Image (cartoon, rainbow, N blue to C red):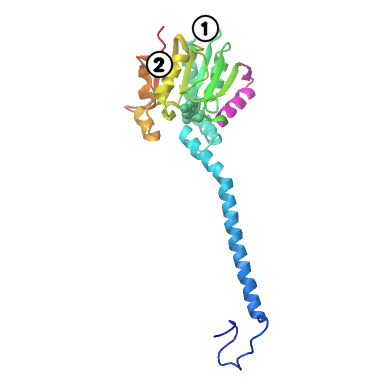
């Protein structure tokens, strides 16, 4: 048996058993220890990065589920570039519904970064606006947008789910929502809550993807459940491509 890896059979005589390992074995052990340390270091670093990256990944996953975007910044930019005319139309529609009221209270469900909110408050100078959203980062972006536009005093943001809203019965004259309903986990409860917080005779205008598209994207039922809470609903095409309706405008009235 060779005592150490550096002794070569047939070359010279078998060395006497050394009291300490020869230099080449010490080098071998040092190299081995370094390798083990390196592997340990990499494993620790990987673990630490995993722990640090998990919240970021969780936040991206959550954002994709609630708004189909990896985060508020991306959504804000895309919406700002592509949806300006879309929001202008909705704001004009809301202003028409509220034309007879001096100080209407508007609730927007799922306002995201506040593009519609800014237009509503600009167009309807006596209105107050409350934005309710499950994503605090979206609400913070909306609040920043309204502050920059000098509109924050007539606004409030609430971090909650449409299915359980912390408002009194009949608190709002108008509820509006855009591109959000197909993300509501319990849309049926959401529409019941919208009905509850509307004053008698108040109106909800819900703009959302066609139920087919919405269901394909999130697997949820969104607009399909709208009529159940209100008894009746009036559907109009809002955006389309050829014969296909991409976005519906659904009007719901809280019958007294
Ligand atoms: C696709 S974004 C639409 C944002 C904005 N309304 C627009 O038209 O650009 C959907 C928004 O709905 C919010 N949302 C999703 N589920 C919700 C729920 N259950 N209750 C309240 N808000 C919700 C999301 O956080 C997000 O801000």
The quarter of the displayed image where residue 121 is located? top right
Q: Is residue 236 visible?
A: no
Above or below residue 9? Residue 36 is above
Q: Residue at x 58, y 10 (%)?
A: 126
Q: Which mark is residue 144?
A: none
Q: In what element is the residue under mark 2?
A: strand
Q: Position of residue 92 (x, y in %)?
A: 49, 16
Mark 1 or mark 2: which comes first in sequence? 1
Q: Does residue 54 appear in this view?
A: yes
Identify the image quadrant of the N terminus.
Answer: bottom right
Residue identifier under label 1: 101
Q: Is residue 74 above or below residue 115?
A: below
Magenta-drawn stretch, dominant element (helix, strand or loop): helix
The residue lying at 60 percent from left, 67 percent from top is: 35
Distance, label 1 to label 2, CA atoms, is 18 Å
Q: Look at mark 2 in the image and give the residue it sits on.
A: 251
**Residue 228 location, x and y as percent?**
35, 18
Q: Classify 106 as above or below 219.
A: above
Label pair 1/2, CB-CB below 8 angstroms: no
Crowd around label 2: few <14 · some 14–19 · many ≥20 (10 Å): some
Disc 1, SS: loop
Closest to the observer, 199 or 118: 199
- Give the number of marks: 2
The verdict on residue 142 being magenta is: yes
Q: Nearer the viewer, residue 53 or 28?
A: 28
| Range covered by the magenta-colored residues | 137-153
Q: Residues within 10 Å of mark 1 (few under 14, many from 20)?
A: few
Q: Is residue 82 left or right of residue 52?
A: left
């Amino acid at each position: 048996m060779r005592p150490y890896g550096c002794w070569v059979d047939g070359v010279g005589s078998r060395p006497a058993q050394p009291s300490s390992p020869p230099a080449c074995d010490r080098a071998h052990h040092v190299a081995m220890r370094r390798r083990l340390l390196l592997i340990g270091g990499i494993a620790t670093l990987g673990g630490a990065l995993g722990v640090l990256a998990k919240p970021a990944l969780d936040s991206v996953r959550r954002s994709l589920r609630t708004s189909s975007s990896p985060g508020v910044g991306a959504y804000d930019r895309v919406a700002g570039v592509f949806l300006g005319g879309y929001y202008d139309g909705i704001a004009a529609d809301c202003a028409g519904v509220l034309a007879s009221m001096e100080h209407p209270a508007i609730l927007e469900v799922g306002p995201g970064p506040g593009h519609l909110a800014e237009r509503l408050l600009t167009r309807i100078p006596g209105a107050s606006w409350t934005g309710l959203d499950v994503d605090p980062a979206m609400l913070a972006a909306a609040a920043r947008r309204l502050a920059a536009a000098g509109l924050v005093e007539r606004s409030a943001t609430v971090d909650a789910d449409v299915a359980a809203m912390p408002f009194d019965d009949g608190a709002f004259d108008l509820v509006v929502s855009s591109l959000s309903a197909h993300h509501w986990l319990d849309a049926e409860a959401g529409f019941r809550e919208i009905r509850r917080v509307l004053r008698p005779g108040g109106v909800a205008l819900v703009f959302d993807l066609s139920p087919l598209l919405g269901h394909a994207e999130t697997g949820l039922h969104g607009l399909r459940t709208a009529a159940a809470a209100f008894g009746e609903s009036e559907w109009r095409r809002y955006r389309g491509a050829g014969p296909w309706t991409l976005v519906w405008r659904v009007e719901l009235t809280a019958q007294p």
